[in-house]
Amino acid sequence: MCDFLNNINWSDVLEWGLTIIPILISLLTLWQTHKNIKLTRKNIKSMSRPYVSIYVDFIDTLLFEKYIVIKNFGKSFAVINDIQFDKPLDEVNSDAFSSLIGASIVPGQKFSSVISDDFNDTVTATLKYMDSEGVEYKEKYVLKFDLTSNLAWSQNRLSTDSSEATALKQGLHALMKRL
């Protein structure tokens, strides 16, 4: 073993080492760059995909009304493939949103349907949709239609206002709350 170490030309070892180290650093840099490109692609895809949601909304003006809403919060359109509810909605919405199956929903677009005031169940909705590249998404949402049952709201009316003025004020108030 000592003879082996004595016969080694240390300048050759150093030369090989100085050649291999930059190659290893280059390979490591290429691997890291590839990883970063994959992550960037994933982030771009995530930011540009559709995000379609189902939720319960309420409007409190002269009347207090509940709505079930489907809205695309994403940055690209989606095609609705299926909408299922684990239990029936109120009698008016027995076939809720079935007309949207196969339809496109663009970013920011929403569809809503009025729900009966006395419908206070909790319903799980399953929504299936796909993006422009054919990637399918399946989302589940718990919809609590009694969400506001313990919240206070008031209906103010000045005695000097006509019913039209009161309706206009309350409508503008509801609009301002949403902006």
Image (cartoon, helix red, strand yellow):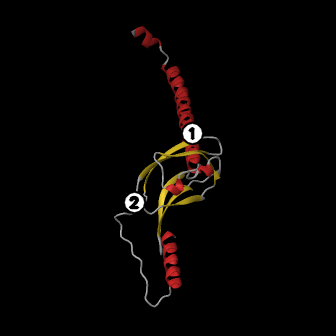
Residue closest to the far left:
150
Q: Residue at x 59, y 46 (%)?
A: 45
Quarter of the image that includes the N terminus = top left
Residue lying at the far bottom of the rendered structure = 160
150 w.r.t. 141: above or below: below
Q: Earlier in the sequence, mark 1 or mark 2?
A: 1
Cα separation between marks 1 and 2: 41 Å
Q: Please state which of the two labelled residues, at mark 1 or mark 2, is closer to the viewer.
A: 2
Dot 2, how many residues are within 10 Å of its Cα: few (below 14), some (14-19), or many (20+)?
A: some
Q: Residue at x 41, y 81 (%)?
A: 156
User: Is there a contact, CB below 8 Å, between mark 1 and mark 2?
Assistant: no
Q: Is residue 72 visible?
A: no
- In-front residue for pair 98/13: 98
In the image shown, does 163 or 129 lie closer to the viewer? 163
Q: Secondary structure at mark 1?
A: helix
Residue 37 point in image, percent of width and height: 58, 41
Structural crowding at the residue carrying mark 1, measured as other residues with C-alpha within 10 Å and reported as few (<14), some (14–19) or many (≥20)? few
Q: Does dot 2 land on a helix, a strand or a loop?
A: loop
Residue at image x 53%, y 83%?
164
Q: Does 7 appear above or below 18?
A: above
Q: Nearer the viewer, residue 43 or 61?
A: 61
Q: Is residue 99 left or right of residue 142?
A: right
Which residue, as the protein is rendered here, is positioned at the far front? 91
Q: Which mark is residue 147?
A: 2
Q: Residue 15, percent across and down?
A: 53, 24
Residue at which label 1 appears: 38
Measured as percent of width and height from the top left, residue 99 is found at 62, 51
Q: Which mark is residue 55?
A: none
Using the image as rendered, state which of residue 14 and residue 138 is in the foreground: 138
Amino acid found under the numbered disc labelled 1: Lys
Disc 2 residue type (three-letter): Leu
Res 116 visible: yes
